[in-house]
Amino acid sequence: MRVILLGPPGSGKGTQANLLQERFSIPKISTGDILRAAVSDGTDLGSQAKTYMDQGQLVPDEIVVGLIKERIKEPDCDNGFILDGFPRTIVQAEKLGEMLRSMGQDIDVVVDLEVGKDELLVRLTGRSTCKECGAMYHKTTHPPKVAGRCDACGGELYQRDDDNEETILKRLTVYKQQTEPLKNYYEKQGKLKTAPGRGTVDEIFSRVCEMVN
Ligand code: AP5
Ligand code: ZN
């Protein structure tokens, strides 16, 4: 099963991808997570990416395409994967298509999570993430039991540098301009399924499971 999760910042791609990887035992591949790990490790890739990420801009296509090319060749991807945050431009989608074709594979379904702008802002300004296991919390809708600590592993929770209102608004604009055209791109291929992203995490997860099965 090869799935793409599409949707604006804060639509729940990461949340749903975490659940899908557990349910179907296939890896989640998040370009955002890979890039943030590179930033925190202080690698060359991280220092290149940070400037773009802090401004809410997309990292250049050739960088992320290179990352994905390496990652999907790994053995744990043989039975499929969930792409979270990739592709984000038509060029990335075309390159992904080429890579998969050369491996005799294809994307099965693209799930688009639709959530309105006001809700996205509330979600992102209240989000915190576990440094250790990546679990996600929200200060009002899903607070941790102990402030600043992950329920699952006790790891420290942090707020992303790009989760301030100014950068969030930029990310939303970039999404509209560069990523939303992918809906039409995958619709034409008969792969697009739209999941209303409002509702509880569990409600949305059931809908997404029906769509990918
Ligand atoms: P990335 O990390 O991909 O961020 P994003 O697309 O902006 O998406 P988010 O991670 O912010 O949101 P999400 O949809 O995963 O929602 P989440 O589940 O966390 O990218 C960051 C940056 O990296 C980009 O700006 C770019 O610079 C760079 N980058 C990454 N990929 C790239 C690429 N392919 N090309 C170029 N550049 C790239 O949920 C959000 C919050 O809502 C959480 O607090 C969660 O608990 C809560 N929540 C989730 N579901 C619900 C629900 N149903 N009800 C209530 N709350 C909910
Ligand atoms: Zn944790």
Image: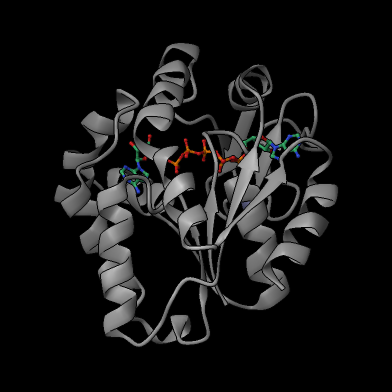
Q: At 32% across and 65% down in the image, what residue appears?
A: 96
Q: At 25% across and 51% down in the image, what residue appears?
A: 91
Q: At 33% across and 57% down in the image, what residue appears?
A: 93
Indicate the quadrant containing the C terminus: top left, top right, bottom left or bottom right.
bottom right
Single out the residue that lies furthest toward the front: 188
Residue 65 image point, x, y percent? 24, 59
**Mark count:** 0
Height in image: 18 above or below 55?
below
Residue nearest the observer in this picture, 1 or 70: 1
Residue 145 image point, x, y percent? 82, 38
Height in image: 93 above or below 72?
above
Q: Is residue 43 visible?
A: no
Residue 189 image point, x, y percent? 47, 62
Q: Is residue 89 left or right of residue 161?
A: left
Residue nearest the observer in this picture, 166 or 7: 7
Height in image: 150 above or below 9?
below
Residue nearest the observer in this picture, 147 or 192: 192
Q: Quadrant of residue 102?
A: bottom left
Q: At 28% across and 60% down in the image, what residue appears?
A: 94
Q: Is residue 49 visible?
A: yes
Residue 60 image point, x, y percent? 19, 43
Indicate the quadrant containing the N terminus: top left, top right, bottom left or bottom right.
bottom right
